[in-house]
Image: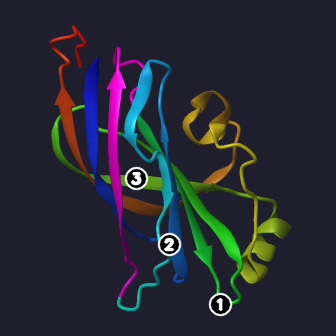
Amino acid sequence: MAEVHIIGQVSGASGFPHASIFCKWTLQLGGGWRVVEGVTEGQTQADQSETGEKVTWCHPIDLHLSTRGIQGWPQLLLQVYRQDDLGRVDLCGYGVTHVPSKPGHHSLTCHTWRPVGTFAEEVRRAFLGGGPQLLSTEFIHSSSERYRLHTVAAGKVHLELGIILRDFQKYGVMY
């Protein structure tokens, strides 16, 4: 089987509100893919920027995957949250980015979005926290249902990924 190695990090974020920010990530795979080794989800530590608007996480990603074809190429689903001084956790944004299909080092920027509520929900969110969240993460990467959501742009998540492809030509898998 053809193999893909993903080695890198969720390096940080920018453009989010000034609070303790952390990110949950999940690897989304198609049906012909198998995880050989590595963890397919994780959460960064919370970081609060003192000097500017960028936070730094440097959370490692190290995955070894095998596949029979390129259909269902891996994606990273990202969920960014903020934690206030009282320990309450609120959604800041959702995002999805495809893992690059070209070998080498890649610096990626994933733009995120969040659902918009009613006027009352947005006022409550601004002063008390909370706000609309998705009940299922399927809407993050599925465009068939996401078009019905009312959303607003959030910040950006920065990733550094190294991609190694092995035996794609040997098994007739073209990319």
Q: Is residue 147 visible?
A: no
> Would residue 175 be counted in the magenta stretch?
no
Question: How far across and down, in percent of the image, does residue 68 sit?
Answer: 35, 14
Give the class, few, some or many, for how many residues have Cα within 10 Å of label 2's Cα (few <14, many ≥20): many
Closer to viewer: mark 2 or mark 1: 1
Quarter of the image where one finds residue 113: bottom right
Give the left or right position of residue 95, taking residue 172 as reference.
right
Which contiguous range is marked in magenta? 52-73
Question: How far across and down, in percent of the image, does residue 162 sit?
Answer: 21, 47
Asked if the residues shown at circle 1 and circle 3 are in contact, with their CB atoms under 8 angstroms apart, the answer is no
The quadrant of the rendering that contains the N terminus is top left
> Would residue 69 be counted in the magenta stretch?
yes
Kindly give the residue lying farthest to the top in the view shown.
Answer: 172
Of mark 2 and mark 3, the one earlier in the sequence is 2
Residue drawn 71% across the image and 57% down it: 116
Tag 1's secondary structure?
loop
Kindly give the residue lying farthest to the front in the view shown.
Answer: 37
Q: Amino acid at mark 2?
A: Phe
Question: How far across and down, in percent of the image, does residue 100 sit?
Answer: 28, 37
Q: Is residue 114 visible?
A: yes
Closer to viewer: mark 1 or mark 3: 1
Q: CA distance from mark 1 to mark 3?
A: 27 Å
Image position of 26 with respect to 74: above or below = below
Quarter of the image where one finds residue 8: bottom left
Q: Return the residue at label 2.
A: 16
The label number, if any, that marks residue 85 in the structure image: 1
Asked if the residues shown at circle 2 and circle 3 are in contact, with their CB atoms under 8 angstroms apart, the answer is no
Question: How far across and down, in percent of the image, does residue 62 sit?
Answer: 32, 49
Nearer the observer, 1 or 144: 1
Give the left or right position of residue 50, taking residue 101 as reference.
right
